[in-house]
Amino acid sequence: MKTELFDVLIVGAGPAGSFAAERLATGGLRVALFDGRPEGAPKACGGGVTAKALKAWPHLLNAVGRTVDELEMYSPSGKRLHLKLDEPFAIYSRVAFDSYLRERARESGAEVFFEKMSTGGIKRTNTGWKLRSAGGTDWLGKMLVAADGANSAIAKKLAGPLSASDMEVAFGYRTPLPDRSEAPTVIAFLPGWVGYAWAFPRLDHISFGIATTQEAFDHKALDDLLWQFMIGYYRQREDGHANIWNDLEEEPRARAIQRNLQATAERYAARIPGLADKTWDQRRACGEGWALLGDAAGFADPVTGEGIYYALRSAELFADAFLEGRPEEYEKLWRKDFGGELRRASQMRRRFYGNFWGAPFTERMIEFARGHSGIKKVLGELVAGDQGYVGLKKKLARRALRPI
């Protein structure tokens, strides 16, 4: 039986795991990074990386992707708002993005193993942890880091399971780019549902999807809604069709587009964290000899589901604390750095997707932004990640009082 000894064992080679592995290996530690996904298997994710993340870590722009400085947003009724962003964000295929970060970790000295780990193969020892593969190899380490996503079995074992109210669902399709026109980046708030739909063009395809709460999830109804959105998107590219929420009722062109997409679309789905505000008070992301990063810790924006920035930042905070010999400080560091922001987002989620002056707040937000440049600018800053939820209400009020 083969045994290998490491300082840190990281399960999960997405952005959080790979980023932590790179930083720890650069600091001189021996790091094992375990990637349990089938090679080339994409993660269910729009792949958007905010301007805030790109400014914090400019090397992310070296990954193969595309930058976006214009965005179309739609209200639940279909009202359109065009945003010219002061700070561009990026869209990546998660296969390309994750591979880029994993290879940076390997080049920094981390050892990458394509092994899927189950909780049955993970044991505490007198000096740390032992991971055993199906082939009989043992890996020993002082610290165990779970960075294996929202469904992390390790996180359930160490920090406890999350309830349905703490989870969201994302699903969608990858489809071909339009033949003869530009493919804009689109976010559309759902009519009659909590959440939003997206169209994120990548280099060789479009990622369409819907994100909503697990409690509100109804697959058949939401899948029908996503098809309306997808067909409306292609109709707009072809003939200027006005409504992004295309009516599928016996309309020949819509049916033809749907048949073409059904022949080529690749489906994906995943759960993503969307923690309730009380859960932030109770759930820990580290303990003696272990830590949780990124989605495994629940670090995602409960309003938008965006988690890549928090995956990278949590990895950075943990790695720095561990390198300084005080891994127990990681809990205080993430709470001080972004914990309050995510908790505030949890408190705002119901109001963000609730009613305001007799209509959905998202409807009013688009209406106000269409008529007021100050509110439009704040909305652009939210998209970029530069404007958080703490202080958002006051900033909107100040902008609304300024002359248009």
Image (cartoon, rainbow, N blue to C red):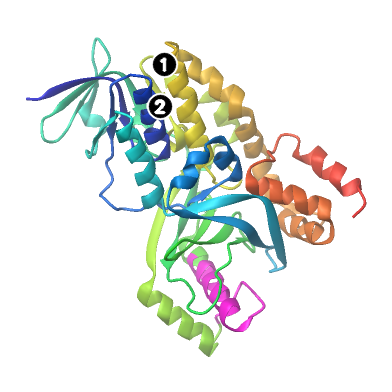
Mark 1 crowdedness (10 Å alpha carbons): few <14, some 14-19, many ≥20: some
Q: Tag 1, which secondary structure?
A: helix
Amino acid carrying label 1: it is Leu
The residue singled out by tag 2 in the image is 23
The residue singled out by tag 1 in the image is 323
Start-end of magenta stretch: 223-248
Residue farthest bottom in this picture: 252
In the rendered picture of this protein, how many numbered marks are placed on residues? Answer: 2
Q: Earlier in the sequence, mark 2 or mark 1?
A: 2
User: Is the magenta region chiefly helix, strand or loop?
Assistant: helix
> Relative to 215, does residue 110 appear above or below in the rendering?
above
Query: Quadrant of the image for the C terminus?
Result: bottom right
- Residue 44 image point, x, y percent: 41, 53
Choose between 192 and 265: the one closer to the eye: 265
Query: Quadrant of the image for the N terminus?
Result: top left
- Residue 48 image point, x, y percent: 52, 51
Choose between 392 and 363: the one closer to the eye: 392
- Residue 273: say if magenta: no
Choose between 108 and 161: the one closer to the eye: 108
Residue drawn at point x = 55 percent, y = 80 percent: 248
- Residue 185 image point, x, y percent: 58, 62
> Relative to 258, does residue 75 appear above or below in the rendering?
above
Residue drawn at point x = 63 percent, y = 81 percent: 241
Q: In which quarter of the view is residue 281 placed?
A: top right
Q: Tag 2, which secondary structure?
A: helix
Q: In which quarter of the view is residue 10 placed?
A: top left
Task: Mark 2 and mark 1 in contact? Answer it, CB < 8 Å.
Answer: yes
Give the spatial CA distance, label 2 vs label 1.
9 Å
* Residue 227 in view: yes
Amino acid carrying label 2: it is Arg
